[in-house]
Amino acid sequence: TPRWRLRRARPTKAMGKKQHSKDQLYITQTEWKKDWGGAKSNKHIPYKVLPFDCCAISLRPFEGSPMCTADGVVFDLLNIVPYLKKYRRHPVTGGPLAASDLIKLNFHKNSEGKYHCPVMFKVFNQHTHIVAIRQTGNVFSHEAVKELNLKARSMRDLIDGTPFGKSDIITIQDPSDGSAREIGHFSHVVEGLDVDHKAGAGVRHNDATARILGKLSSTAAEAA
């Protein structure tokens, strides 16, 4: 009978260099490009799917006003404004995108500061099916909309009563299908596109963002 010896794997330089990324809920754009992206294989990406509360440009939790597109991709306003100004296209799909296409999201937090459904009061996590209503930007668990809107045949926003159609339900996160949130497929990551985030920090709720938010509010009001 052949005798097998087990040998302990030797720690590699790569393990030491990248181990810290596994302790985070996200990786930074710089880490992605330097350690995981570019010409290197995507097989070793530590976090394949972007968390629901992270900006699809910075790959970090959003800090300013969260915005989304009709296909449910979430961005921090502070990042998407300079990106659109420079590239005028969708950072994830690569298709055309204008500021007027963005929808301001209204996430709700509980007393502990965690994002949750304002109706079911369940805390959001990576396993939660999360949706938003196009007309209001209010964010709910899919369970709430399914039970209280779709099944009840009462198509009004569960917070302010604004009427909406089934096609106005935007999926922010579907735990059964994370393909749309796979970082390795993001257009700006694949192409290595970037913006000067130091310059972007200067748009923090100044006149430029105020005009954009005002325009978005007017567009939403006209649609309603």
Image (cartoon, grey):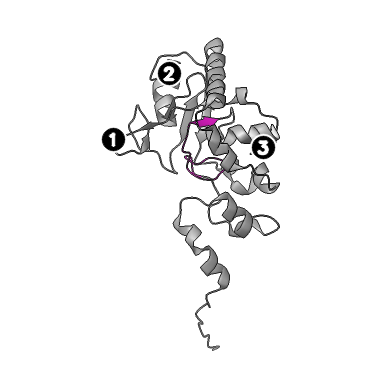
Q: Position of residue 120 (x, y in %)?
A: 34, 30
Q: Earlier in the sequence, mark 2 or mark 3?
A: 3
Q: Position of residue 92 (x, y in %)?
A: 64, 39
Give the side of residue 105 with respect to residue 85, left or right.
Answer: left
Quick check: 152 above or below 86? Answer: above
Task: Say whether residue 169 is visible.
Answer: yes
User: Which stretch is magenta?
Assistant: 51-68
| Label disc, if present, on residue 157 of the rendered structure | 2
**Along the line of sight, which residue is nearer the eye, 40 or 197?**
197
Res 68 → quadrant: top right
Res 110 → quadrant: top left
Look at the numbered disc 3 and give the secondary structure of its residue: loop
Pointer 2 with pointer 1, Cβ within 8 A: no
Give the side of residue 137 with respect to residue 70, left or right.
Answer: left
The residue labelled by disc 1 is 111
Look at the numbered disc 1 and give the secondary structure of its residue: loop
Residue at the image point whose x is 51% and y is 41% from the top: 176
Look at the numbered disc 2 and give the secondary structure of its residue: loop
Q: Earlier in the sequence, mark 2 or mark 1?
A: 1
Quadrant containing the N terminus is bottom right
Question: Of the residues shown, which amino acid type is indicated by label 3?
Answer: Thr
| Label disc, if present, on residue 93 of the rendered structure | 3
Q: CA distance from mark 2 to mark 3?
A: 29 Å
Pointer 1 with pointer 3, Cβ within 8 A: no
Residue at the image point whose x is 67% and y is 42% from the top: 187
Quick check: 151 above or below 34? Answer: above
Res 89 → quadrant: top right
